[in-house]
Image (spheres, rainbow, N blue to C red):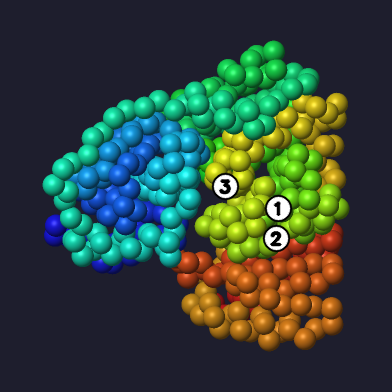
Amino acid sequence: MAPTADVATLDAIFKAYDVRGLVPEQLDADLAQRIGAAFVAVTGAPRVVVGHDMRPTSPQLAAAFATGASGAGSDVVSIGLAATDQLYFASGHLDIPGAMVTASHNPAGYNGIKLCRAGARPIAHDTGLADIRDLVAAGSVPVAAAQGTVTERDVLAGYASRLVGLAPVRGRRLRVVVDAGNGMAGLTVPAVAALLGPEQLDIDPLYFELDGTFPHHEANPIDPDTLVDLQARVVATGADAGLAFDGDADRCFLVDEQGGLVPPSSLTALIAQRELARDPGATVIHNLITSRAVPEMVAELGGTAVRTRVGHSYIKATMAETGAVFGGEHSGHFYFRDFWRADSGLLAALHVLAALAESDRPLSALLARYQRYVQSGEINTVVVDQAGVLDDLRATYDGRDGVTVDELDGLTVSHRDWWFNVRPSNTEPLLRLNAEGADAATLAAVRDDVLTRIRSHR
């Protein structure tokens, strides 16, 4: 097999955790086929599962990947249209490696492939993704003498049943606005809602039509601009809550009954409380830019909080090492031990709805105990010398009274009343700042000081 993509292109589209690029300029059906064959060569899997999202190019790329995988000798189970956590369900339930064709929240011109080993175990750069890239680049993927088969299987009902079984919603009837962003939540939310029944959950759908051109707004709920329609609908209808999902529906963001945006750290704390009630003393994972309220809450509830680097492969690996019951990230990814340690935005949403249905309080009051500090959100700055900026910040803050410094992921500087983390981007000349303070004034002071120092290097 001769290579069809130059090394520069492959390096550009093989990211830290997945494959992602412009179609067809960087990723086309021929390359997807070669990635499918390399995936089988690296995993050695006799059977794999493949799903795809609603982007116009996704069915073709998924079919090409399946052709490559079957050509390398693996039997392919095609689940068709699916959310990413639905693919993880299939990988876990069938105990086989999986591939999900999606570009998640990226604009319509992009597509990509998320990969996992059997049991939904992650494949990242250091755990197989680089090996797949190298095989594709070398054109050295063998073609099997006996090709595998491709069969179709519908797993939507089993997936929905699994989620509802893990977080059953019982109690008062809820009215919830859901913005699917024309993404895969338009398929999965109705399946779950049907199991709960209209007497328990009244869904008000926004943009449920599957449309990978994203005619209303980008399916990227970490961007507050994409949540404006949801906020307005919640307030106008008097709904109990609003849910927003990204394009492949593995991330969930929350709006309270007043239209207020709920920090993902608050969801992490709420779900941690529920999981610790079910499994007292368990371990909960949080990444290092999650609010300080999360480890505080876990400790108060008798659990053990473990801090990790940012990124799903680190979260999942640490969950496996510690046996953690749950893990949460600031980016709206939530991971569950009983869902093969995979992330599921819809399962996180069900936990919130279950807590709300069991309570007679509105969502804003239910979450108030978890919102102890003020966070900056992520602020990106383009810099030429990332390492030089980090060295300058380290020299500035290290040694100050009451300050501790660590380099678990970038540079984290902590004080009793505040903390900040600055991390370099893996793919762009950016530094990412996240900060938190005991109050708005404290946050503003530390944020502005750090930003001034970062921007002095531009």
Q: 203 or 63: which is nearer to us?
A: 63
Which kind of residue does numbered mark 2 sit on?
A: Val
Q: Which residue sits at x=61%, y=84%?
A: 391
**Which residue is tagged 3?**
341
**Which residue is tagged 1?**
284
Q: Quadrant of residue 178?
A: top right
Q: Position of residue 155 (x, y in %)?
A: 44, 28
Q: Which mark is residue 88?
A: none
Q: Which residue sits at x=36%, y=64%?
A: 130
Note whether 350 is above or below 377 in the view shown.
Answer: above
Q: Position of residue 189 (x, y in %)?
A: 55, 27
Q: How much space separates mark 3 and mark 2, taking CA atoms?
A: 15 Å
Q: Quadrant of the N terminus?
A: bottom left
Crowd rating for badge 2 (residues with CA inside 10 Å; few <14, some 14–19, many 20+): some
Q: Quadrant of the C terminus?
A: bottom right
Numbered disc 1: secondary structure: strand
Q: 87 or 373: which is nearer to us?
A: 87
Counting residues from the start of the chain, the first of labels 3 and 2 encountered is 2
Which kind of residue does numbered mark 1 sit on?
A: Val
Number of numbered labels in the structure image = 3
Label 3–label 2 contact, CB within 8 A:
no
Label 1–label 2 contact, CB within 8 A:
yes
Numbered disc 3: secondary structure: loop
Q: Position of residue 334 (x, y in %)?
A: 62, 46
Note whether 420 is above or below 318 in the view shown.
Answer: below
Which kind of residue does numbered mark 3 sit on?
A: Arg
Q: Quadrant of residue 195?
A: top right
Q: Position of residue 423 (x, y in %)?
A: 58, 69
**Which residue is tagged 2?**
306
Crowd rating for badge 1 (residues with CA inside 10 Å; few <14, some 14–19, many 20+): many
